[in-house]
Amino acid sequence: MTTKLADLYTSQIKLNEAEPLYRRAVTILEKFFGPKDGEVATALMKFSELQVLQSKFSEAERTLWRAVQIRQHVHGQDHEEVAECLEMLADVQQKQENSDQAERLYQSAISIREKVLGSNHPLTAATWGKLSKLYVIMEKYAEAEAIFLRLLSAKEKEEGTAKLDIAFLLEKLADLYIIQQDTAKAETQFELALEILHEQTDQSDKSADLMEKYSILLERAGRLEESRKMIERSRRTRT
């Protein structure tokens, strides 16, 4: 009950009210189940989320490491719940701009998830996505590109709604090439993404947004007439 009330306060952004409730919940669970029980780890995870909202990143890091140790004790090293903790730790490290530590933690979470869930599981792919964003921040563009291509390869083997995911990844690849000032490669990704979106009758706004971004690329490349036509095409698509 204490944890649920703390969750409610957190959802209502009543952070000061939620903090003592999480502390009390952890204490009660430790007394009732023991300090190395999975329920304690779950409460610590929720408490860490509050600490992140409070920008208490060092405290959140300590809280999460306690949760990692408990979950490793309960489940062993290679378990999805351990990977979940490591991913959250990586998120906290990234917020503190500790990129090297975040990279290692994301890689550890991915390694576990690939063993337990498989390489193409949505949770594994999501962590790969976070690592790719980190690589862009770190200016490790080759590593980021490799991840995007890997995720694209996996999505291309799926069917149905995966097409929209492919379009999203192609756009991200285009963004990466724009950063590297590789206009030709960025243009190719935009064209491929638009081809997919044109097949989706409910994605006209997304297509129009992508065309606007494409027009900026063309303008920066000095291709003003093509840029103008792309803007006109965007307006027609949106209406």
Image (cartoon, rainbow, N blue to C red):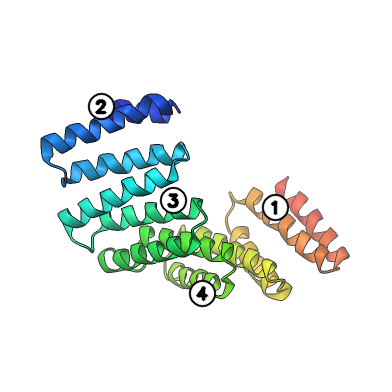
Tag in front: 1 or 3: 3
**Is residue 146 at least partly visible in the picture?**
yes
Instruction: Report the residue marked by disc 1.
Output: 208
**Separation of disc 1 and disc 2 at Cα?**
48 Å
Asked if the residue under mark 2 is in contact with the one under mark 3, i.e. CB atoms within 8 Å, the reply is: no
- Residue drawn 18% across and 46% down? 38
| Residue at x 79%, y 55% (from the top left corner) | 231
Which one is earlier in the sequence, the residue at label 3 or at label 2?
A: 2
Other residues around mark 2 within 10 Å, as few (<14) / some (14–19) / many (≥20): some
Residue marked by disc 3: 92
* Dot in front, 1 or 4: 4
Q: Quadrant of residue 43?
A: top left
4 or 2: tag closer to the N-terminus: 2
Closer mark to the observer between disc 4 and disc 2: 2
- Residue ID for mark 2: 2
Label 2 residue SS: helix
Question: Which circle's residue, 4 or 3, is located before the other in the chain?
Answer: 3
Instruction: Tell me the distance, in whole angstroms, between the alpha carbons under discs 3 and 2.
Output: 25 Å
